[in-house]
Image (cartoon, rainbow, N blue to C red):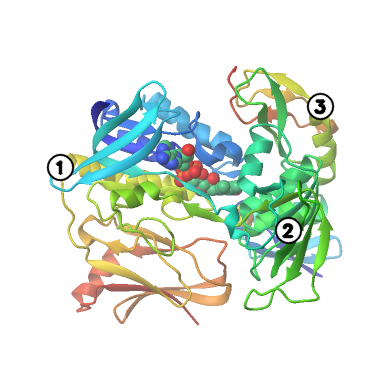
């Protein structure tokens, strides 16, 4: 069986063909770089995503701070991760890289801030 | 009205303006002679609301979110101590051909209306969304209709949701990204409708913003009816034929409280026009040469003001070149522009090019020419000719309007062909079988 996937690792979005031998990846073609190869191998077995969202900020120049998972988490954990952040409030100031929540949804991955929000 | 003089004024403190300022300072323009004018209360431009990741792979070899990418350049500008004025709106620029002075008029709360006489100006105002007028349907305009970028600002900066049940018209990147964003924030995105037979957005965004969440994308569809008087209650979409006219009988009605319009971006060029910069009717941005200089000596342009980019890395790269050339212009004390040696003409599906003219004496060893194509092309060649002489040709698996393409011109090759007798000054970029 062959599968056609679009690499999402960078905006070029290579079309990658994966030849499957049962559950094993037999051959990968169409990727411009090694990241594409690694991506499709993971995508056909255990897909992962980086999640970006916002958390509410109290006492800041704006009411929300952008955050991300510090690494990728399993795709099926995305909604659980979002839920864990929904009612969270942080105090301004917020700095890029601040850990907002440790080990989100038991993924072993932390949520970190991606914007600077000054007191306001 | 207070008056000041500066060597270099940069209009816009987004990624383009920041990278241009950094490059100019690094190329030797004294920082006290540079000033960035930004109308927002923060540097970083549109990136501050683009909280998704995928920025900077080319520049920093890591995947950053928009605000993180912007912050790298903001830090750099701070380290170099490049002065910037926030909450400062530029309202006019005029050019005095005799003296070469560009008079920049701006205003803010602390200085009121003031002018700066600049020897060089870099236009880096970015782009704005196509207005709601793009929605060409009769009837009421109830509340609940937003451009996608406005909704992005609400959700990501102000932390509030514009609605709960959403239909999106337009599948450009902002539309796709907002489909996922609204879904994550608990809204139900019912459908993304796209007028054209292809998406205007990046493929990766279709995969990770729509496919991941099971949001349907309906190509060749448009909105034909909006119900609701006070607030949107339902939206009807229909399929369109090859003339983009709705096909009767294909209507589908979606109940919703919000309609997002992601109908594309337009370079923000009122100021450029006032200044007398020659514009491209296709991009809506200034026409520039290999140095990213406009028809006016000492007026440069870079970033989304020039043409809409989907990759901020390219914006930063382009802006660096503009900054370096502005520095060179200032050190040469040049006041005029020579006629270009080559004019780039685009044909066969290539819609335009940036730059559009070349001076060979100031061209670097290689020159990246960027453009967009007018339709989807599969297994075609991207060819470059000088007159009748073929310079290069590259086979491309897929080219699509949503993705910016480029060719890299080699100066040595151009010179060789000219020495061998090619007299034409027409450099043609085209798609061929
Ligand atoms: C929704 C969206 C998603 C994107 N996704 C990606 C992505 O995944 N990866 C990627 O690499 N790129 C992405 N991009 C593209 C990238 O963000 C842009 O290419 C980049 O921000 C353009 O930079 P710029 O400096 O030209 O414009 P902008 O960021 O728009 O900055 C222009 C600045 O000029 C200021 N300005 C305008 N007029 C005036 C005036 N008269 N006086 C003073 N200041 C003024 C504005 O306030 C603004 O700050 C995305 C863009 C959008 C909109
Ligand atoms: S394979 Fe490499 S170049 Fe192609 S989309 Fe993936 S990361 Fe980008």
The residues bearing labels 2 and 3 have C-alpha atoms spaced at a distance of 29 Å
Report how far apart the C-alphas of labels 3 and 1 lie in the structure.
Answer: 59 Å
Q: Which residue is mark 1?
A: B333
Residues marked 2 and 3, same chain: no
Of the 4 image quadrants, the one containing the N terminus of chain B is top left
Is B378 above or below relative to B282? below
Assess whether mark 3 and mark 2 are in contact (beta carbons under 8 angstroms): no
Callouts 3 and 1 in the same chain: no
| Placement of B147 over or under B171, stated as above or below | above
Q: Name the residue beneath numbered marker 3.
A: A87
Q: Which mark is residue B192?
A: 2
Report in which chain the residue with disc 2 lies: B
Label 1: state its secondary structure.
loop
Near mark 3 (Cα within 10 A), the count class, few <14, some 14-19 or many ≥20, is few
Nearer-the-camera pick, B139 or A66: B139
The image shows a total of numbered marks equal to: 3
The x, y position of residue A35, in whole percent, is 64, 52
Q: Secondary structure at mark 2?
A: strand
- The foreground one among B41 and B199 is B41
Residue B112 pos. (x, y %): 36, 25
Which chain letter goes with mark 3? A
Q: Residue B227: which numbered mark, if any? A: none
Q: Is residue A96 above or below residue B386?
A: above
- Label 3: which secondary element: loop
Q: Earlier in the sequence, mark 2 or mark 1?
A: 2
Depth-wise, is mark 2 or mark 3 nearer the camera?
2
Residue shown at the point (54%, 37%) measured from the top left: B69
Q: Nearer the viewer, mark 2 or mark 1?
A: 2
Within the image, what quadrant is residue A102 found in? top right
Do callouts 2 and 1 point to residues on the same chain?
A: yes
């Amino acid at each position: 069986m062959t599968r056609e996937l679009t690499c999402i690792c960078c905006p070029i979005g290579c079309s990658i063909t994966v030849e499957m031998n049962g559950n094993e990846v037999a051959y990968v073609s169409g990727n411009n770089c090694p990241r594409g190869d690694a991506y499709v191998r993971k995508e056909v077995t255990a897909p992962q995503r980086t999640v970006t969202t916002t958390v509410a900020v109290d006492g800041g120049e704006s009411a929300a701070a952008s955050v991300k998972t510090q690494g990728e988490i399993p795709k099926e954990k995305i909604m659980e991760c979002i839920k864990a952040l929904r009612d969270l409030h942080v105090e301004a100031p917020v700095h890029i890289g601040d850990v907002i929540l440790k080990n989100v949804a038991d993924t072993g991955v932390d949520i970190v801030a991606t914007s600077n929000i000054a007191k306001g | 009205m207070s008056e000041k003089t500066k060597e270099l004024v940069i209009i816009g403190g987004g990624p383009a303006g920041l990278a241009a300022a950094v490059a100019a300072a690094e190329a030797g323009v004294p920082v006290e002679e540079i000033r960035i004018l930004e109308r927002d209360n923060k540097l970083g431009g549109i990136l501050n609301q683009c909280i998704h990741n995928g920025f900077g792979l080319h520049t920093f070899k890591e995947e950053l979110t928009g605000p993180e990418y912007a912050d790298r350049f903001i830090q750099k500008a701070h380290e170099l101590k490049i002065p910037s004025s926030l909450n400062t709106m530029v309202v006019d620029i005029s050019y005095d051909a005799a003296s070469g002075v560009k008079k920049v008029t701006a205003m803010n709360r602390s200085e009121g209306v003031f002018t700066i006489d600049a020897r060089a100006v870099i236009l880096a105002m970015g782009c704005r969304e196509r207005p709601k007028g793009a929605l060409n349907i009769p009837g009421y305009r109830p509340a609940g209709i937003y451009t996608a970028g406005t909704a992005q600002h609400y959700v990501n900066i102000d932390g509030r949701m514009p609605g709960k049940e959403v239909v999106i018209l337009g599948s450009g990147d902002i539309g796709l990204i907002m489909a996922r964003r609204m879904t994550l924030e608990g809204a139900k995105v019912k459908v993304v409708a796209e007028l054209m037979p292809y998406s205007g957005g990046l493929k990766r965004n279709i995969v990770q913003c729509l496919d991941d969440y099971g949001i349907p994308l309906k190509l060749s569809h448009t909105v034909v009816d909006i119900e609701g008087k006070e607030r949107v209650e339902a939206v009807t979409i229909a399929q369109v034929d090859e003339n983009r006219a709705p096909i009767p009988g294909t209507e589908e009605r979606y109940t919703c409280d919000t309609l997002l319009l992601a109908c594309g971006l337009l370079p923000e060029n009122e100021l450029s026009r006032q200044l007398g910069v020659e514009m491209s009717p296709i991009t809506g941005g200034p026409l520039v040469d290999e140095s990213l200089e406009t028809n006016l000596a000492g007026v440069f342009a870079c970033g989304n003001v020039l043409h809409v980019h989907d990759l901020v890395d390219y914006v930063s790269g382009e802006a660096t070149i503009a900054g370096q050339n502005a520095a060179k212009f200032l050190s040469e004390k040049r006041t005029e522009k020579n006629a270009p040696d080559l004019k780039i003409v685009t044909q066969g599906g290539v819609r335009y090019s940036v730059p559009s003219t070349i001076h060979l004496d100031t061209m670097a060893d290689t020159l990246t020419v960027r453009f967009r194509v007018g339709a989807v092309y599969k297994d075609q060649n991207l060819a470059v000719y000088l007159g009748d002489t073929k310079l290069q040709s590259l086979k491309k698996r897929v080219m699509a309007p949503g993705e910016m393409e480029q060719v890299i011109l080699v100066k040595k090759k151009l010179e060789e062909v000219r020495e061998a007798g090619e007299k034409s000054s027409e450099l043609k970029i085209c798609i061929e079988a």
